[in-house]
Structures are given as structure tokens and as C-alpha cells.
Amino acid sequence: MPKGKLTRIRLIMRIAVLLLCAAVVTGVSIYLFKPDLFARAGQEAEETEEQPPPDGIIKPDLEPPKPEPKPQLDAPAPEEAPVIPEEAPPKKQAEPGKGLIKVDGNNLFALVTKQTTLGRYAPGDLQTIPAGFVHPSRRGSKHYLRREPLGHLRDMWAAADKAGVQLTVTSAYRSYDTQVSTFNYWVELRGEAKAVTFSARPGQSEHQLGTTIDFNIDTNAGKKQHDWLAKNAHNFGFAMSYPKGAENITGYIYEPWHYRYIGVAAAKEWKAAGKPLCVFLKTKQ
Ligand SMILES: [Zn+2]
């Protein structure tokens, strides 16, 4: 082999050895001074291996981890937090509904539906219902009816009592403002869509007429009341406003406890017609 070529091979080998040494020294240095680089490389290798879900079950309802709360530097210390007065809940339809047909509450046949309004009507001849007619749980406050229906309630109460049935009133006259609270209460509790099926909006409740009564028919004793009223109430001028199966006509669920006074002759006529009260009253307008 010529001497020149041998020298060149030796030179290349020396360079190769030097490069190898340099690589080894660099590797050792990184391992000693930056060990996390090795750790991370190992972790990445592990993470790329796909892990099957435990038991093969995917739980879509698992909550994503919550981010660490960041300290709010500008927030006051809890004990220094300012007291913010609670905002009064907005009153739903605080004013009598616009676009609705206004009806006169003094008319015994007033058409009280979801398309009409009594506005802020209040009867002028309200009288207190004797406490003995009221359900014990409702005797904490006074209940009122207009003079004429109260007279007929007295007669009806006496007739029922004679038949061994004790009628108990749970609700009677409700003012516009009371109905605002009542309706809002149910909206809060059950949501508006549900509330409107059993609670009238202010200005649209027959209770605002002062001629309407709810009887307690929930208990076992109530069953007797229910049966007796269904059979006899019309003879005393009272009609059940929201019968079974007429929800799409009346807009309200079946309310076998809710009776409205329309006068004896009209109530008998209503009973014979066998129609929902609002349909019957339309013929009286
Ligand atoms: Zn009622």
C-alpha cells in the first residue's frame, strides 16, 4: 500500500475516534446535568402506547378535570365582601295583559280565559267566609266571597252537612296582586310552561271574581266532598270550571276542586248542556 494512502486512512480513523469520543462526552454530560431530558423521552415513549379503557367501558359522563383556581388578586377578602342587596324578582305581567279582551268582573257570566283579562278588577261586596267553612289548615287568614255566592255557599254547606258531608274551603277570593304572587310562586317552583296549566296569570283567574271556591278534596274525607259536589253543586249555582278531558279547550288541567258561582238557573243549564264552563258561558255573552 502506498505510504500516502496509509496516512490518509490513519487520519480518517483518528477523526472518527475523536468524533466518537466527543459524542460520548456530550451524552454523559447531558445525562449528568440534564437528566429530565432522558426522563421525558422515556415518558413520551410510554404515552404513545395506547391504553385500553378500564373494563372496556367508556364513561362519557365523567367530568373534565377542573382547572386550578387562579388567585384573584383584586377580589376583596371574604369578610370584607360588600353586601349586595338581593334584586326583587321581576313581576310577571305586573300590568294587565295587553292585547287581551277586557271583561267586566261584575258580570256573573264574565268569560275568564287565557284570551281575556279582568285587569285589576276587584269586587265591591266581599264578605268574610265563616271560619267553620274553611279547612283547618287555612284558618290562619280570612277568606272572602261576594255577597250572593256566599249566601249560596251557606245553603250548600248546610245541605251537605245534612247529608253527612263537611265541605271545607281552601281558597276563595284572590286579588290581582295575590295572583301575581301565586303565579310567580308556581313559576319559580315548576317552571312557566308547567305553571300555566294549573295556575292562572294575574287578571285571568276566576278567583279574582270573588265568586269562586276551591274545596279540599285531597283526603279520604275529601273524596266524599268531591262526589257530593259533582252531584249537587249546580243546584246551588256552582259549576266546576275545568272538567276532565277538556284541557285543550280550557287550557287547564282537570280541577275537580274548583267551583265558580254563576247563579242557580245558569248552573242547572250548564249541567244539562254537559259542556266545559267556558264553552257554555260563550253562549251567554
Ligand atoms: Zn281554584
Image (cartoon, helix red, strand yellow):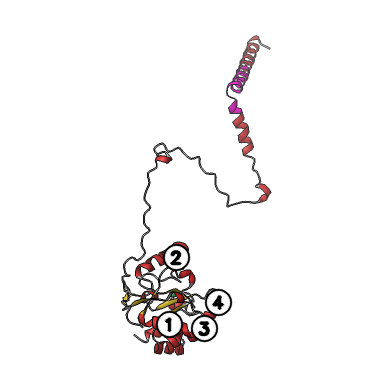
Circle nearer the N terminus (2, 1) = 1
Q: Residue 187 placed where, x, y %?
A: 43, 64
Q: Which residue is mark 4?
A: 221
Label 1 element class? helix
Please tell me whether mark 3 sits on a helix, a strand or a loop.
helix
CA gap, disc 2 and disc 1: 31 Å
Image x and y of residue 256, in percent: 49, 78
Give the labeled residue for mark 2.
186
Of badges 2 and 3, nearer the viewer stands: 3
Q: Which mark is residue 228?
A: 3
Which secondary structure lies at badge 2?
helix
Which dot marks residue 154?
Answer: 1
Q: Of the residues under marks 2 and 4, which one precedes in the sequence? A: 2
Residue in the picture at 32% in, 80% down: 106
**What's the residue type where badge 4 is placed?**
Ala
- Closest to the camera, between mark 1 and mark 4, is 1
Q: CA distance from mark 2 to mark 3?
A: 29 Å
SS assignment for the magenta stretch, majority? helix
User: 45 above or below 3?
Assistant: below
